[in-house]
Image (spheres, rainbow, N blue to C red):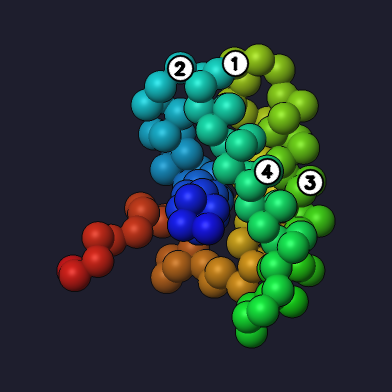
Amino acid sequence: MAQEATRVVEALNLLTVLAAPRLYERWCTQAPAEELRTVLQSRMAALAAFCEKAWGSPDAERFRSAAPKVRALAESLAAAPTGHLTATGWNVHALECLDALGVQAPSGGWEAFEGLRPSGD
């Protein structure tokens, strides 16, 4: 259960990175493209699975209703050519997923987003 929660948090963080073009561009330089694509695809697949089976919390319905959008992004990532990290629409898919999940755009919008601040700041 803790491992699933960690993967969901990682997936949500990656969605915010994918939604912010400058952050995503930087993220894409951190490791070989195939490795990063695998991480993206696996995290989005894990998030889609979590959303599809969500229950028992006030947010469960929101997660379930977001599942098709998250699944579509995961499938798009899985279908990308080997070593490919950019596709028309991934940014738009990420924005749609975040919106469906109830994650509001940061002040200044996703274009200006520089990442989450460490807690305690």
Earlier along the polypeptide chain: callout 1 or callout 4?
4
Q: CA distance from mark 1 to mark 2?
A: 8 Å
Q: CA distance from mark 3 to mark 1?
A: 20 Å
Pointers 3 and 1 in contact (C-beta within 8 Å) = no
- Indicate the amino acid at tag 1: Gly
Between marks 1 and 4, how big is the CA–CA gap?
Answer: 18 Å
Residue count near mark 2 (Cα–Cα under 10 Å), binned few <14, some 14–19, many ≥20: few
- Element carrying mark 1: loop
From where the camera sits, is residue 62 visible?
no
Q: Which residue lies at the image location 63% right of the left edge and 80% below the top edge?
A: 57
Q: Are marks 3 and 4 in contact (CB under 8 Å)?
A: no
Measuring from the top left, give residue 75's x and y in whole percent. 77, 37
83 horizontally vs 73: left or right: left
The disc at residue 32 is 2
Decide: is 31 above or below 101: above
Q: Secondary structure at mark 3?
A: helix
> For the residue marked with disc 3, what is the amino acid?
Ala
State the SS at label 4. helix
Seen from this angle, which residue lies furthest bottom? Answer: 58
Mark 4 packing: few (<14 Cα in 10 Å), some, or many (20+)? many
Q: Which residue is mark 3?
A: 72
The mark nearer the N terminus, 3 or 1, is 3
Residue plotted at (24% across, 60% down) = 118
Quadrant location of the C terminus in the rendered image: bottom left
Q: Residue at x 54, y 71 (%)?
A: 104
Do labels 1 and 2 touch, CB within 8 Å? yes
Label ID, residue 83: 1
Mark 4 highlights which residue?
45
